[in-house]
Amino acid sequence: MSSTTGFSSYFHFSQVDWASMWSATGETIWMTVFSLVLVAIIGILLGLLLFETTDSHSLWARLLHWLAAVFVNVFRSIPFIILIVLLLPITKNLVGTIIGPKAALPSLIISAAPFYARMVELAFHEIDHGVIEAAESMGATNTQIIFKVLLPESSPALVSGITVTGISLIGYTAMAGVIGAGGLGNLAYLDGFQASNNTITLVATIVILIIVFIFQTIGDLTVRRIDKRITR
Amino acid sequence: MIDIKGVSKVFKGKKEITAVEDVNLQINDGEIYGIVGYSGAGKSTLVRMFNGLETPTTGTVTINDTVMSDLHGKELREKRQKMGMIFQYFNLLWSRTVLQNVTFPLELTHVAKEERQAKAEKLIETVGLKGRENAYPSELSGGQQQRVAIARALANDPELLLSDEATSGLDPKTTDEVLELLLKINRELNITIIVITHEMHVIRKICDRMAVMDAGRVVEEGSVFDIFRHPQKEITKQFVSEEETPQLSDTNVVIKELLKQVPTGKIIKLTFHGDQAKLPIISEMLRQFPEIDLNIVDGSIHQTQEGSIGTLYLQLLGDGQEIVDAQDYLHKMRVETEVIRGE
Ligand SMILES: Nc1ncnc2c1ncn2[C@@H]1O[C@H](COP(=O)(O)OP(=O)(O)OP(=O)(O)O)[C@@H](O)[C@H]1O
Ligand SMILES: [Mg+2]
C-alpha cells in the first residue's frame, strides 16, 4: 500500500487512470473553446455597444450605455464561484442539467464576456480618432467603419485580449469542475483530492499548465503576425 | 465653386467657444486657396464644415451648388466621396498595405476589385511610390505616408481636396516635395485645393489666393501676391515678415551693428516685385548717383505663384540730397522703399 501523504505521494503514476485523464482534458478544452467563441462574439458586440454609445448626445444612447456599463461592471465584480451558484436555477432551465461540462457554459460565458467587453471597448478607444475621422471624411457608413476600421485596426489588442480571457476561462472551468462541471478541475477534486490521490492532482495541474501554455503561444504568435504597427 | 456665407461655429460645452465667426469666402474652381492662422484660430473647424464633419451654427457652406447642411445620411456620404482630405498625422490604416490603403475609399464605394487595384496602382505611381505597394505605413517615412494619404484622397476622383496642416509634421525638404506634388495634382487633374497651414511659406509656394484667420474671423483675404506686397492687418504683417526675412532679428542686429560702426548713413528697405527683381536696378542707381556708397545689410528673393518678391536692406552713405534723389529714382522704377533708420 502506497502512502497518501508526503512528497512521494505525487509520483504514483500507476494509479492514474489515463483514459479518464484524457477525457477530462477533452472536456476542459471543449468548455474553454466553446465558451471562448461565445465570449468573443458577445464581448465584441457589448464592447462595440459601449464604444459607440460613449459621449453620445442622444438620450437613448446614454441609457443604453448606462445599462451596458452596469451589466458589465456587476458581472465582472461577482466572484466566479458565487456566480455559478447564483446561476444554478438559470443553468438548469437553459441546459437542462447542473452537472457535466455543458452546465458550466452559462456561468463561464456570463462572467467572461463582460471582462472581454471592457477590453474590446478599450481597444477601440485606443484607435487614433483621426483614422476614424478620415474614414468618415471619405463617406464611410457606420457599418463600414466597424468592419473596415475598428475591427482590423484594433485586431492585435482584440487577440491579446481573447488570449488573456481564454486563460482565465481555463481557470474558471477548473473551479466549475469542483461543483460538478466535469473537466480536469473535477477530476483533480474527485479522483485527486477526495480519493487522496495526489498524483492525479499533479498530473491534472501539469495538463492545465500545458493547455495554458499552448493558448498563450497561439495568442502571442497571432498578435505578432497581424501587428504591422512596428517594423521588425 | 465654394461659397461660404456668414458661417459661424459655436461649441457648446461647459464654456461656449466661438471657433469660427461670420466667415465669408468664395473659392473658385481649380484654385489653390490658402488659409493661414495661428493655433486655435479656427482653421480646422472651418475646413471641417466644408465636408460636413462639423455643421455650421449659422450660415451656409455651398459647394458646387450644394448646401452642405442640407445633406444627410446617404447624400452626405456621397458628397463626401467627392472630396478628399489629408491630415497632419496622415491617418492611414496601419493594418493595411500602401495599396490597400489607397483602395480603401474605392471599397467604400463598391468599385469592382480589378478596377480598384488598377486605379490604386496608377495613383501610387502619380504620387511617386511605385514599387512600395506592399509596404505597410510603419515602414514608410512621414513624407511617403503623406503621399499615400494623398493617393487615397484622390481615389474617388474628388472635385475638391482639403489639406489640414498636411506638411506641418514634415521637414522642410519633404514639405517642399509634398507641396510640389499638390501643385502637380492641381495642374494636371484640375482639382480645387484648400490648404490650411500656420506656415506662410506653404501659402507662398503653392497658393493663388489666401485668407488670414485670427480668433475665428477672416481678417484679411485676397491674392497671395497682393497680401505679401501690402499686408494690411498687424497679424498679416507678422506672418509676412516671418516669411520675408527668416532672420529678421539678425537683420536688426546687423543694422544696429552697422549704425554703431558707421554712425552716418541711412538704412532703407527695398521691395521688388515680379520682373523688377530681374532688372539691374541697383547698379543703374549707382551709375546715376556715383557719390553714394552702399552696404548690403540683408536680402532675399521668394517665388510665389504670380512671380518673385525680393527684399533688400541697404545702408546708403553720402550726400543727403543725392540719397533723396536716389530714392526718387527707385520710386520711379516702381521699387518700394521704406526708411528703417534716418540719417
Ligand atoms: N469639438 C470641439 N469642441 C469644443 N471646442 C472645440 C472643438 N473643436 C475645436 N474647438 C475649439 O475651437 C477653437 C478653434 O479650433 P481649431 O482646431 O479650429 O483651430 P486651428 O486653427 O485648426 O488650430 P491648430 O493650428 O492648432 O490646428 C479652439 O479654441 C478649440 O479649442
Ligand atoms: Mg487645426
Image (spheres, coloured by chain):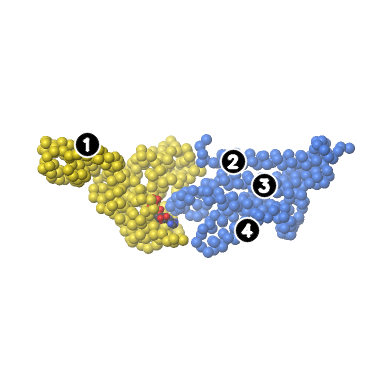
Chain colours: A blue, B yellow
Mark 1: secondary structure: helix
- The residue carrying mark 1 is B261
Q: Quadrant of ligand 1?
A: bottom left
B103 left or right of A97? left
Where residue B149 appears, as percent x and y from the top left, is 42, 44
Q: Amino acid at mark 3?
A: Ser
Neighbor class of circle 2 (other Cα within 10 Å; few <14, some 14-19, many 20+) is some
A10 left or right of B34? right
- Is label 4 on the same chain as label 3? yes
Q: Quadrant of residue B261?
A: top left
Q: Chain of mark 3?
A: A
- The residue carrying mark 2 is A222
Q: CA distance from mark 2 to mark 3?
A: 19 Å
Mark 2: secondary structure: helix
- Is label 1 on the same chain as label 2? no
Question: Who is closer to the viewer here, B342 or B119?
Answer: B342
Q: Amino acid at mark 4?
A: Phe
- Give the number of the mark in front: 2 or 3: 3
- Give the number of the mark in front: 4 or 2: 4
- The residue carrying mark 4 is A71
Residue drawn 22% across and 39% down?
A: B259
Lower position in the chain sequence, tag 2 or tag 3: 3
Q: Chain of mark 2?
A: A
Q: Which mark, residue A168?
A: 3
Quadrant of the drawing holding the C terminus of chain B: top left
Q: Amino acid at mark 1?
A: Gln
